[in-house]
Amino acid sequence: MKGLFFLGVDPQQSSAQRADDGAVTIGVAVDQREKQDRELAPREADFRFGYVYHRFIKGFTSVQWAGFIHGLHQGFGFTNIGLDAGAGGGGINVMRHLADRNQTIPTDIFFDGKARVDVVRNSVAREVRPITPWDVPEPVDRQPILSLMKRGDVGIEQVFNERHAKWVGDDNFVDALQQEMNLALQTGRIGLLPTMAELDPHVYKDWTAERLQILALSDQLRKQLMGIAVKTVRDPSTGQDRELRTAHGARIYQFPARKDLAYSAIYSYMAFRIWLRFVEQGYVPESEDQVWSVTF
């Protein structure tokens, strides 16, 4: 079967030119359509979407984040990338450096347990095609495969359509993202990697350390997703729990201590949804040269 890869990136709060900690998730959408049906515009139901890669990053600068993303792109050939660009996050600085033509691609990343940071032990300098948002016209040879996870992004506008026009603040956007993710999980539209406890040890006894780490992070992803919940209060007049909402009408959420892995997974899924919407609208063609062979 063939699939398209979608990257979700959630760099945490930035200071100066740093993006610091964060997480990345890669999802793959496998086309289930028969060859004769691929002349029609695809729908979400035509694909199986699931996650194949997770990673935490700690202590990277924005330049290192950009090189890391370009390196992943050279390996996977992403169809779209969802990058957190909200207020207080590190995504805006990362976005600027993704457009740089000269990148330093890390080839060996080591986690220094004492310093609690990721250290790039080996890297290679490469000239690349800049990665830019879909609606940025320059440079001519850019790769316009970047969707910014914020209000006003052209892809977000397309996916949420009339709802987007009614949003007053970022709280409405966060609420919409959460509701879309919850619905996708509840209806089985997203496949999560199994946890180590769900597999027989003989399945992974010969796996590399990186594959075992991805498996362990799948368990952390589940815990982060389950730790995100709508805040409620007991209504004394009815005796029922009532959702708390902001002045803009958005649900108020309580989050676990870390939510970056969960949000990188949400952004990966939204990158897929945005691409699908662009294809439906005729903005971009379905590209055969971005198709990879994959197995779940």
Image (spheres, rainbow, N blue to C red):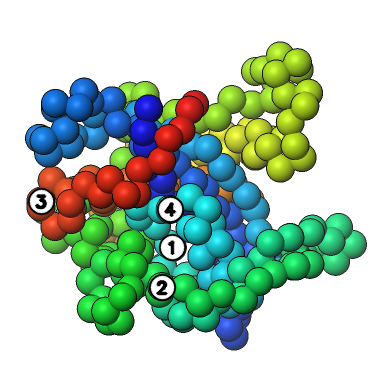
The residue at 70%/18% (across/down) is 203
- First in sequence, mark 2 or 1: give its number: 1
Query: In terms of image quadrants, where is residue 186?
Result: top left
Determine the CA span between mark 4 and mark 1: 20 Å
Question: What is the secondary structure assignment of the residue under circle 1?
Answer: strand
Instruction: Compare residues 157 and 74 and report the one nearer the observer.
Output: 74
Determine the CA span between mark 2 and mark 1: 21 Å
Q: Is residue 167 above or below residue 239?
A: below
Determine the CA span between mark 3 and mark 1: 24 Å
Q: Quadrant of the N terminus?
A: top left
- First in sequence, mark 3 or 1: give its number: 1
- Mark 2 sits on what residue? 129
Q: Is residue 14 left or right of residue 170?
A: right
Residue 281: give its label: 3
Q: Is residue 154 left or right of residue 237?
A: left
Residue 208 screen position, x and y as percent:
75, 37
Q: Residue furthest front?
A: 289
- Mark 1 sits on what residue? 84
Question: What is the secondary structure assignment of the residue under circle 4?
Answer: loop
Question: What is the secondary structure assignment of the residue under circle 2?
Answer: loop
Determine the CA span between mark 4 and mark 3: 23 Å
